[in-house]
Image (tube, rainbow, N blue to C red):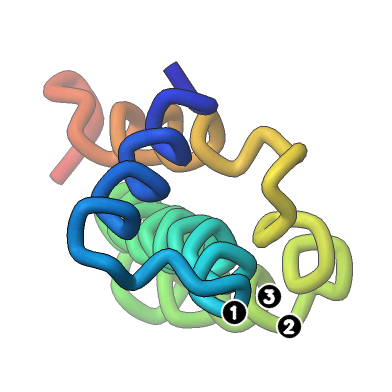
């Protein structure tokens, strides 16, 4: 499913006539950046839900300033999509304390 998302982006760029080399190189990076941002958001929601907003803010700070996440989560060959879906599922898990 993950490569299909990139194929859909490339297809939309082709249909709209925006398939220049610059946009073809930039589109996957923007998608991965959005996935990384969603992972950060859901991680904050999960930490805030389980431990309170203060811990959620510190967890978000640690996530955003971690060099590994900063470097690897936006790469197209990483498991950023899986991380995003897992974090969203955990943040929405019904049996966690709210």
Viewer-nearest residue: 51 or 71: 71
Can you say which quadrant of the picture contains the C terminus?
top left
| Label drawn at residue 3 | none
Q: Quarter of the image holding residue 86?
A: top left
Residue 36 position (above or below residue 22): above
Alpha-carbon span between mark 3 and mark 1: 32 Å
Contact? badges 2 and 1 (CB < 8 Å): no
Residue 9 screen position, x and y as percent: 35, 48
Tell me residue 49's x, y (percent).
Answer: 26, 53
- On the picture, is 54 further left or further right than 25? left
Residue that carries the numbered disc 2 in the rendered image: 65
The CA span between labels 2 and 1 is 28 Å
Residue bearing the label numbered 3: 62
Q: Is residue 65 above or below residue 66?
A: below
- Quick one: 54 or 42, which is closer to the camera? 42
Name the spot of residue 1 as percent of width and height, x first. 43, 16
Residue at the image point whose x is 50% and y is 73% from the top = 20
For marks 2 and 1, give the one nearer the viewer: 1
| Residue at image location 35% in from the left, 65% down from the top | 41
Q: Pointers 2 and 3 in contact (CB under 8 A)?
A: yes
Query: Label 3: few (<14), some or many (≥20) within 10 Å?
Result: few
Disc 1: which residue: 22
Say which label, 3 or 1, has the lower sequence index.
1
Determine whether label 3 and label 1 are within 8 Å by CB.
Answer: no
* Residue drawn at (59%, 79%) of the image: 22
* Mark 2 and mark 3: Cα distance apart in space: 5 Å
Horizontal side of residue 45 vs 56, given as left or right: left
Against 20, residue 28 (above or below) is above
- Pointer 1: residues within 10 angstroms few (<14), some, or many (20+)? few
């Amino acid at each position: 499913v993950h490569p299909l998302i990139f194929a859909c982006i490339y297809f939309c760029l082709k249909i709209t006539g925006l398939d220049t080399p610059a946009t073809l190189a930039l589109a996957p990076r923007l998608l991965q950046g959005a996935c990384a941002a969603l992972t950060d958001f859901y991680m904050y929601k999960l930490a805030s839900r389980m431990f309170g907003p203060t811990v959620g803010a510190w967890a978000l700070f640690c996530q955003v300033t971690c060099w590994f996440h900063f470097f690897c989560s936006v790469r197209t060959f990483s498991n950023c999509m899986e991380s995003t879906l897992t974090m969203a599922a955990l943040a929405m898990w019904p049996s966690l304390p709210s």
